[in-house]
Amino acid sequence: MLLELFPLVAKGYLEGKRKVEFEAQREANRKKIAAERAAIKRTGRLKIRDLTLRDGQQSLFATRVPQAEIETVLPLYKDANFYAMEVWGGAIPDSVMRYLNEDPWHRLESIKEVIGDVSHLTALSRGRNLFGYSPYPESVIEGFNKNAVKSGLGIMRIFDCLNDVKNMETTIRYMKEAGGIADCAVCYTVDPKFTRKQRWKALLAGKKLPKKIFDVDYFVNKAKQMEAMGADMITVKDMAGLIPPSLSGKIIKRLKKEIDLPIDFHTHCTPGYGLGAVLMAIVNGVDIVDTNILNFAGGPAAPAFEIIQIFADKLGLDTGVNLEAVVEINKELKGIRERIAEFDSYKMFPLEFDITADYLPKEIDSLFDKAIELAKADKEEELLEVCNAIDKFFNFPAPNEEVKAAEIPGGMYTNMLAQLKSLGLEDLLPTVLLKVPEVRVAAGCPPLVTPSSQIIGVQAVNYVLDVNSGKAPYTNVNNQFFNLVKGEYGETPIDIDPEYRHKICGQSEATDFDVSKYQSPENPVLDEFGGVKLAENEKEMLLLELFPTVAGPFLKNRKADAYYEKVNAEEEEKQRIIDEKKAAYRAIPAEEKEAMMLKGLYSMGGDSTQATGEITQPEEKESKLDIKTKEMLMAQKPKSRLVG
């Protein structure tokens, strides 16, 4: 009745009433859920590495979350008590300078200042490539790792794009010498996927296609090599989300049996395997899993912590995470996501879910139980169906079927498509996808992880463009592909045909990265900004070493800002002194001012200069003063009206 008579007023009243009732119900739920969770018999521990502030925002929002936004959630993260927080490395050092005009060292140091020792701060390093895309000399590698630890880093996750453990050796040593933890990552990748036609063509041409390379033994053996090198922990790192649940379970089970180190599992959700793969890792005894908080999870990012926490509760595993703090972080993340919407390609927010106060619908809760049952029984196909249904309930993006079918990383797929679109040739994408395995095998079958995935992707596009324009294949070879085939990135999983290497590089033998040819970027003196150097300390010089084209302008702008700030401060100080003197002069009685003026005329400076702050000529002797001028001024002086 009220709604009919007064629709707007009644609607607002009813909505407000429902909201009050909803919050009251939530509060009652919160107490009940807390009691239920406290009653769970915990039989094990599952540590959580939160990726939200690095991998999460890099995967979903192109690393565009500014420092000011990050600082709003840090006090909450301190209360959350995650085992570790990935906050640095990867694309962060480059991107925060390039797009946000921020200092990457300051970002790490400011996070450490708030978090302290509550959680290990983690960074991702590409081994000999550090945070860049090419190999660097030992001095740069040592400097970056040691300064990272000094700035607050606790764990450096180290990987190599070729899984060449030799490229990780010195980073492991430098981290341990500096007091950090060396987390060595085995990069998961898939074997090249050939069509039947391609196999027949290779057979007729007398070229053998490689047999299966990347099996369980391959990954376990790589982990053992890393353990022998001094790794403190091992991560199975699936950057593309291509590891199916059954295989994640098998690899984790073998690693837990054969390696005496903590094992971490990292994956993404792009093709729809992520949640199932993490659950399989958990039931097979993994020590640590990587997650993002709900509003920064799913799609190309890692699975949501809240979903993993529900699984952990049902399995009797203690994560040690403060869930009340996580709820508050998630609220803040929603606001951050709204404020950086221009970089959000999905614009698809997950379900508003408070893990401390919201009960799942019974049919969804039963899906969690079913998923655990299927994971323990290793029934992959059914497990994926159930996990995808859970993701759908939480409103995460559906699996990317194109990436799933192509079996390549999502970033590689989108980059190749963008390269073709820029030329108006996106219709060539299917042909490019067919060429990827051929180019990859020819180049030694590198794992499809950064930067090798991008190198192979760009060259596959170049190959097709060459043929499409009537040129011979490999007419256009990108510089990084040239260096990969030459051997500068390290040892590839399979040998490169010497004839092919000669065709690409003009030499048959592999040549490692030549440190003697490395040239540090120039560090000029900036005369226009007070004669300071572009890089004034080791940390700034390291940024210049890794990202000269980005760090150069960034550092120059910083020097300009500092210089003009100093100049302005000096001018303001001068003006302050002048203003003080003027104010002091104005406070002097009139007769005293007249006396000072006359004294000034005789002295040409002195006290009048000090009182007014005005600049006068140097003092001259009275004998040289123009007597007539003085007499004239004295005659103009008004006579006093006071009677003595």
Image (spheres, rainbow, N blue to C red):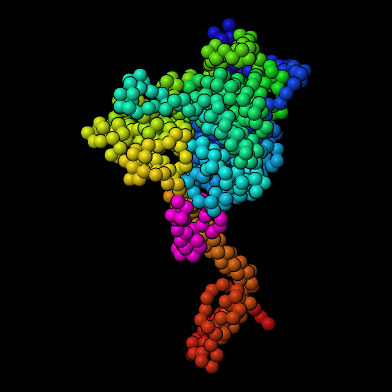
Residue 612 at x, y = what percent? 57, 72
Residue 128 at x, y = what percent? 51, 45
Query: Which of the two residues, 91 or 328, is positioned nearer the viewer here?
Result: 91
Residue 130 at x, y = what percent? 52, 44
Quadrant containing the N terminus in the rendered view:
top right
Residue 280 visible (yes or no): yes
* 198 left or right of 302 in image: left
As drawn, the residue found furthest toward the top would be 1
Residue 166 at x, y = what percent? 54, 42
Which residue sits at x=71%, y=26%?
Answer: 45
Query: Which of the two residues, 281 or 273, is positioned nearer the viewer here?
Result: 281
Quadrant containing the C terminus in the rendered view:
bottom right
Residue 418 visible (yes or no): no
Residue 288, image quadrant: top right
Q: Magenta part of the protein: which range?
A: 514-543
* 518 left or right of 642 in image: left
